Amino acid sequence: MKLYFVRHGKTQWNLEGRFQGAGGDSELLTESYQQMVQVGRFLRHTSFQHAYSSPIRRARVTAQHVVKELHQHVPLTLMSRLEEFHLGQLEGMAFDDVKAQFPAELDAFRNHPDQYDTSRIGGETFQEVIDRMTPGIQAIVAANPQPKANVLIVSHGAALNAEINALLGTPLPDLRKRGGIRNTSVTVLETTDGGQSFNLLDWNDTSFLTAAASPTDTI
């Protein structure tokens, strides 16, 4: 069974370098809609049994557009467990302002997930996000028992980075070492034992995107 993880399209807050968690949802950029088409065309030759998405608008709209481009009848289910980090006081803040006001929290969020302490700012820790998302992924695997099933999962950059690495057995301190995830990228995991373990087949694939990458594309 293969799980195709897609990060949502780029938004205005992504472009501006602002924290955008479960409590924020700025508009998708015009260019993002073309990239959603490119994702769908890239995945069109794969047969999908089901699609799942975070209910937050930027992910939901991305999922709807990608599914449309698959030219298949693929049911789409919204799952709250696939939401982005809840970020507390960081929500909507510019990265530079966070660096000035909460330097330790910013450094931990980016570089030391095991040290990310939310006691001053509120929101979820990395472990709390993983503990929320993993049962959702397990439910998705259980709901698609065909041995060669393919499912599409549309979610958010920071949450996907944490959860995918956790599914691969990466220790909490090392969750960020594989690198970031770009908007409208595709990462593929495979499980052959019903979700007990996962293998990484493709990480942050953007080969199908025609637009050049910029630093604000990746988290």
Image (cartoon, rainbow, N blue to C red):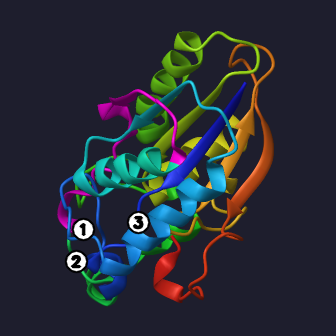
Answer left or right for 71 relative to 100. Answer: right
Which quadrant of the view contains residue 118?
bottom left
What kind of residue is marked 1? Answer: Leu
Alpha carbon separation for disc pair 1 and 2: 5 Å
**Range of magenta residues:** 70-91
The label shown at residue 216 is none
| Mark 1 lies on residue | 90
What kind of residue is marked 3? Answer: Gly
- Residue 191 in the image: state x and y as whole percent: 76, 25
- The numbered mark, 3 or 1, whose residue comes first in the sequence reads 3
| Mark 2 lies on residue | 93
Above or below for 54 versus 81: below
Q: Nearer the viewer, mark 2 or mark 3?
A: 3
| Mark 3 lies on residue | 9
| 83 and 105: which is toward the camera | 83
Q: How many labels does the image show?
A: 3
